[in-house]
């Protein structure tokens, strides 16, 4: 697992907690403390992602109640069944990190997004209502990623002189140092080349396995927009892979992940 936690408090008790540490698979750590959780929200508009997010399916009523984890709380709505905070983070940290890594394409941003996601969860857990906890995490992570990209683009446009020339860096590519889930490197490169909105739609559909309806709810867009972004994103990946001579771009197409 990616996490080691020093918090024994239940998810409904958000005061008096000890510092929490979210680890990645290297020796370095990302410290997440209560001070981080309680700090003022930034002005990126991401508070909107902590609203209600309920994608419970109609057949959930008749489903077998899971034995443990947030799925049991989602199935019953019994707040007493919400896992302790350390168990909650341990259960979901890997999935959040994988999504953040696929979206951002690098280790540093994935760690930051993972930390920010759990800060948002920690601060808003009391407002969460039983539905689909994983879907709620998808929504928070994805919106934080899109906000990060928009914020960076705005800063870049405002800060760079008109005659600025981009020079490729000499630092090693993070993908060469860190690999997650053994996704084909050429495919990750193709994903990274997509516009953020297309990348998010393709990752949520073809890697995370969300339905079009769930993606529409996650991104806050219409179903037709989701279909269009996925179609155009997949086509761009095909073209990218074909141009690079990777099996004519057909062996690792988006819908074949």
Image (cartoon, rainbow, N blue to C red):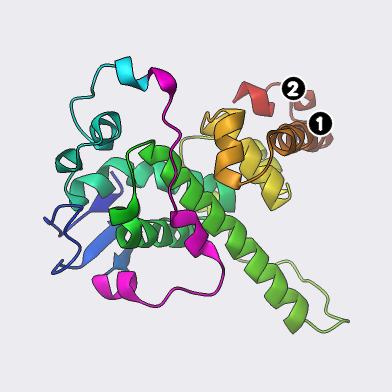
Q: Secondary structure at mark 2?
A: loop
User: Which labelled disc corresponds to residue 69?
Assistant: none
The location of residue 156, given as percent across then percent down, is: 72, 75
Image position, residue 149 (x, y; %): 64, 62
Label 1 SS: helix
Q: Residues within 10 Å of mark 2 (few under 14, many from 20)?
A: some
Question: Is label 2 in contact with label 1 (beta carbons under 8 Å)?
Answer: yes
Range of residues picked out in magenta: 34-59
Residue holding disc 2? 250
Relative placement, left or right, of 56 versus 130 is right
* Residue picked out by circle 1: 242
Q: Pinpoint residue 244: horizontal percent, then vertical percent.
A: 79, 37
Relative image position of residue 150 (x, y in whole percent): 66, 64
Q: Is residue 171 above or below residue 209?
A: below
Residue at 87% x, 81% y: name it. 162
Residue 139 lies in the magenta-colored region: no
Query: Which quarter of the rendering shows the N terminus?
Result: top left
Q: Residue at x 70, y 44 (%)?
A: 198
């Amino acid at each position: 697992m990616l996490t080691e936690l020093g918090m024994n408090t239940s998810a409904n008790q958000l005061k008096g907690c000890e510092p929490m540490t979210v680890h990645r698979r290297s020796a370095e750590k990302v410290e997440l403390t209560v001070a981080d959780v309680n700090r003022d929200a930034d002005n990126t508009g991401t508070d909107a992602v902590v609203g209600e997010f309920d994608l419970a399916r109609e057949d959930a009523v008749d489903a077998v109640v899971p034995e443990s984890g947030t799925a049991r709380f989602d199935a019953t709505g019994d707040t007493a069944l919400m896992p302790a905070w350390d168990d909650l983070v341990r259960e979901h940290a890997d999935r959040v990190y994988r999504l953040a890594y696929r979206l951002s394409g690098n280790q540093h941003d994935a760690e930051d997004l993972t930390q920010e996601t759990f800060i948002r969860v920690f601060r808003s857990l009391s407002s969460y209502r039983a539905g689909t906890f994983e879907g709620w995490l998808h929504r928070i992570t994805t919106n934080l990623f899109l906000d990060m990209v928009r914020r960076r683009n705005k800063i870049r446009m405002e800060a760079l002189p008109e005659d600025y020339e981009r020079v490729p860096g000499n630092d090693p590519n993070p993908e060469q140092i860190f690999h997650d889930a053994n996704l084909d490197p050429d495919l990750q490169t193709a994903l990274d080349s997509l516009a953020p909105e297309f990348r998010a739609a393709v990752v949520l559909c073809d890697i995370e396995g969300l339905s079009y309806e769930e993606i529409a709810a996650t991104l806050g867009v219409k179903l037709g927009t989701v279909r269009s972004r996925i179609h155009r994103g997949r086509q761009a990946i095909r073209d990218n892979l074909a141009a690079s001579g990777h099996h004519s771009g057909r062996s690792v197409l988006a819908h074949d992940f």
